Image (cartoon, rainbow, N blue to C red):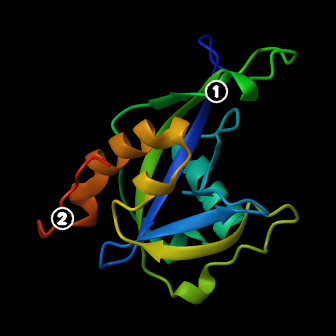
Amino acid sequence: MIDSDGYRPNVGIILTKPDGRLLWARRIHQDAWQFPQGGIRREETPQQAMYRELEEEIGLEPQHVDILGATRGWLRYRLPERYIRRHQKPVCVGQKQVWFMLRLVGEERFVRLDLNSKPEFDNWRWVEYWHPLSEVVSFKRNVYEKALKELAPLAFPGGNMPTYSAR
C-alpha cells in the first residue's frame, strides 16, 4: 500500500524501560541497528499494525507493554535513490510513519527475536535514550530525531530527561 506521494504507511516502535533506556535491535546478518518498525496493512489501524509488528519482530504481546503515546502525525523519510525500485508499480520513494512509545511491563525474557520464520533482527540491547541518533542509518536519522524529541516527555514523566545535543 503506497500513498499518492509514493510513501508506504508504516509504524515505528520505541520500547523503553522505566529507567529511560531503549530497546535497540540489530538487523539480521548486518551491522545495522534500528528500532522495530513495519508496514501498515490495508484495513489495519496504526495501533493494530504496531501490536502485530511488536510480536513478529521482538516477540512481545500486548500484555508485555503499556502504550505511553504516539506521534501526532506522520513522520516521513525518503529512501536514497539506490533503494528505490523504479520497476515496481506504484513506486515507493520512502516511508511515512506513526511512532509509538511503549514501556516494557513484562519481563525481558519475553523479548524473542526467533519467533518469526523470517526474523528481522539477530541481537538487541538496551541503550541510552539519545544513542540511536548516533548509530541509525543516515537517511532515517531526521525521523528518529523528531520521534525521540516529541515522545521524550512520555519516557521521562518526572522531568529528568537526559540532555540532547545534536551530534
Please give left or right for residue 106 compared with residue 4 in the image: left
In what element is the residue under mark 1? loop
Asked which quadrant contains residue 118, the reply is: bottom right
Please give left or right for residue 117 compared with residue 129 in the image: right
Q: Which amino acid does label 2 sit on?
A: Met
**Circle count:** 2
In depth, the one of 153 and 31 nearer the eye is 31
Residue 66 placed where, x, y %?
Answer: 41, 68
Q: Mark 1 points at which residue?
A: 80
Asked which quadrant contains residue 1, the reply is: top right
User: Label 1 vs label 2: CA separation?
Assistant: 33 Å
Return the residue found at the far top: 4
Name which of mark 1 and mark 2 comes first in the sequence. Answer: 1
In depth, the one of 7 and 54 nearer the eye is 7
Residue 150 placed where, x, y %?
Answer: 28, 45
Q: Residue at x 43, y 45 (%)?
A: 144
